[in-house]
Image (spheres, rainbow, N blue to C red):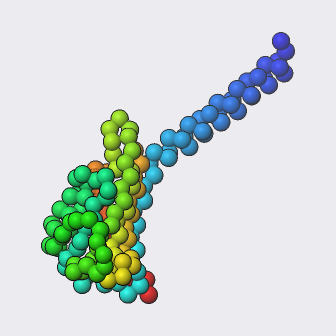
Amino acid sequence: MNDSFCSKIVATLIRQASFLLLLGLLISSTGCVNRATATLTPGADLTKLKTFYLIPGADDKENYLLIKSNLEKRGFGVTTGPEKPLPYKEDSIVHYLDKWMWDITPYMLELTITFRDPNTNSPLAMGNSYHTSLSRLSDVEMVEEVLTNMFNAKAVK
C-alpha cells in the first residue's frame, strides 16, 4: 500500500467518526428538552376565581388528585366530578391532559391544564409543562410548575 491510499482511509475514518460523534451528541441532547408556558385569554382575571370544578380524565384513577390538592393548598375550593351541562356554579372548570412515558420508571412527560369559563366553556387560561427523561420533574412538581405559571401569567392586551 502506498501512503496516499492510507491517508485517504484515515481521512475517511476521521470523517465517519466525527459524523457519529455529532449524531450521538444530537441524539443525547434531546433528552434535556423542557418547556413551561402559560397564557391567559385577553380579559381573563384569575384573581376573581375562588372555586373550581375539576373534571378527572376518563381513565384517571388518582392523578387528578394532585391538581385538586395543589389548588386547595392555594386556598381554592375544588369540586370534582364528571363533565355536566353548562353552566357550572363554580368560578371555573378545570380540564387537563397528562402524557406519561416510560424510561426505567414511568414519569409524566407533559401536563396541560386549562381553566374554562363556567358559562361558555371558553378558555380563560392554559398552562403547559414538558420535561423529557433527563430533565424530568415529579408529577407533583409538574402540577406545581403549571399552576404557578398560570397564576403568575400576565394577560396580553
Q: Residue at x 27, y 61 (%)?
A: 56
Q: Tell me residue 76's x, y (percent).
A: 17, 73
Indicate the quadrant where residue 36 lies: bottom left
* Quadrant (top left/top right/bottom left/bottom right) for the N terminus: top right
**For residue 90, above or below residue 74:** below
Q: Is residue 113 visible?
A: yes
Taking depth in this image into account, of 43 and 64 the one nearest to the observer is 64
Marker count (numbered): 0
**Residue occupying image coordinates x 50% and y 45%:** 29
Instruction: Name above or below for residue 144 compared with residue 135.
Output: below
Q: Position of residue 155 (x, y in %)?
A: 39, 82
Q: Quadrant of residue 121?
A: bottom left
Whole-percent x, y for residue 65 in the image? 21, 58
In the image, what residue occupies the spot 16% across and 73% down? 77
Residue lying furthest top: 1
Residue 144, visible in the rendered structure: no
Residue nearer the viewer, 1 or 69: 69
Residue drawn at the location 50% of the way across and 46% of the way down: 30
* Residue 133 vertical position relative to residue 62 in the rendered view, above or below: above
Task: Please provide percent x and percent y for residue 85.
Answer: 30, 75
Q: Is residue 125 above or below residue 67?
A: below
